[in-house]
Image (tube, rainbow, N blue to C red):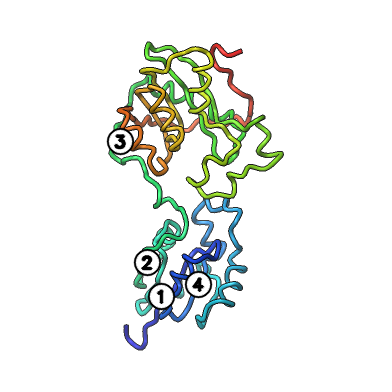
Amino acid sequence: MSASSKKVITAYVPVIHRGYLHFLEANSDAAELYVFGPQLIKKVDYLRKDLRALTPAKAVKSLEAITRFSVVAELSPAGLKKLDQPNVEIIMPDEDISREIAKDIKKAKVTFYPIFLRWDRHNVDQPDESAEVSRRQADQKLMRQAAKAADSSSDIWRRVGAVLVSADGRELGAACNRGEPTEHSPWAEGDPRNVFNRGVGIEMSLFTHAEARLVAEAANAGHSTKGASMYVTAFPCPACAKLIAHSGIKNLYYKDGYAVLDGKRILDDYHVRVRKVEIADPPKSGHTADIPYVGSS
C-alpha cells in the first residue's frame, strides 16, 4: 500500500466481545475504525429486533476506551461515500450487513475478513435455489389456506401458518404459530426469544410453531400422519423438521423462508419430499382469532 493510501475498518458492532476484539487486533494496521450508524443499519431490516444491541454511539464510546485507533466514529451514508476512494482499503467482517452495505462501495478496495462474530443470514442453511417447485392449482390452494391461517397469529414479527392433509387427501386441520399459555402471553410477559437474532434460541420462544401444533393435534385427535402432506408458509426450523421427519409426513410444501442449520438435511435423510409453492402474499386482516383443529374438542 502506497504512502498516500490508507486502510480503515468498518463494522456493525451490536456488542463487544472477544470475537470483535480479535477482529480489530488482526487488522490493527488500519488507521481508522468506523461503526455503522443508524442510517446504514436500517438497510438490514431484521436488525430492529436485536434488543441487545448497543447504540452506535455507545459502541463508539466503548471502543474509544479499549482500542488505539486514531479515529473511532459512527459511519453515515455520507461518510461512507467520502471513504469510497481508490486509495482506500475498507476492511469489513464477512457477514450479511457488511456485504449489504458494501454494495454501495464502487471505488475503494473492500476486503471481507473471515471471522464468526454473530449468527447472521450467511451462517444459516438456505433452501436450495434449485428446489423443486410445484405449480399445481391444488397445492397453491392449500398454500393460500396456510397463508390465511398465518394471518391469525398474534406474533407481529413472524406469522406462520400451516395446513395438514392426510395420505388419502383429507384436510385434517390448519394452525398458526401461537403464544402459550394464551396468544397474548408473549406480549403481556415478554418473550425471551426476542433477545436472539434470527435462527438463534428458537427453543426459548413462548410460541408453539404451527407445524408442531398440527402434528400434536393430529395425534390428540387420533389421525395418522403417515404419508401425509404439510403446507407451511415458512420453511420449518430444525425442531419442526425433526418432528415432521419422525411423524411419517412424506411431502412438505413451503412458501418462503430459510432452513436453519440442519433442517433441510434432516428432511432429506428421512426421504421427505420438499417442494416450494409460489403464491402471492394475501392481504392482512389484522385479526388474531385462533383456528380450530378438525376433530378437536
Q: Nearer the viewer, residue 51 or 6?
A: 51
Instruction: State which mark lies toward you, 4 or 1.
Output: 1
Q: Which residue is labeled 3 in the image?
A: 131
Local secondary structure at mark 4: strand
Label 2, label 3: how many angstroms apart (C-alpha)? 31 Å
Three-letter code for the amino acid on which mark 2 is drawn: Tyr
**What residue is drawn where x is 49% and y is 75%?**
33
Three-letter code for the amino acid on which mark 4 is drawn: Tyr
Instruction: State which mark lies toward you, 3 or 1.
Output: 1
Local secondary structure at mark 3: loop
Q: Are marks 4 and 1 in contact (CB under 8 Å)?
A: no
Vertical arrangement, residue 285 with respect to residue 112, above or below: above
Three-letter code for the amino acid on which mark 1 is drawn: Asn
Q: Which mark is residue 113?
A: 2
Q: Are marks 2 and 1 in contact (CB under 8 Å)?
A: yes
Label 3, label 4: how many angstroms apart (C-alpha)? 40 Å
Q: Which mark is residue 27?
A: 1
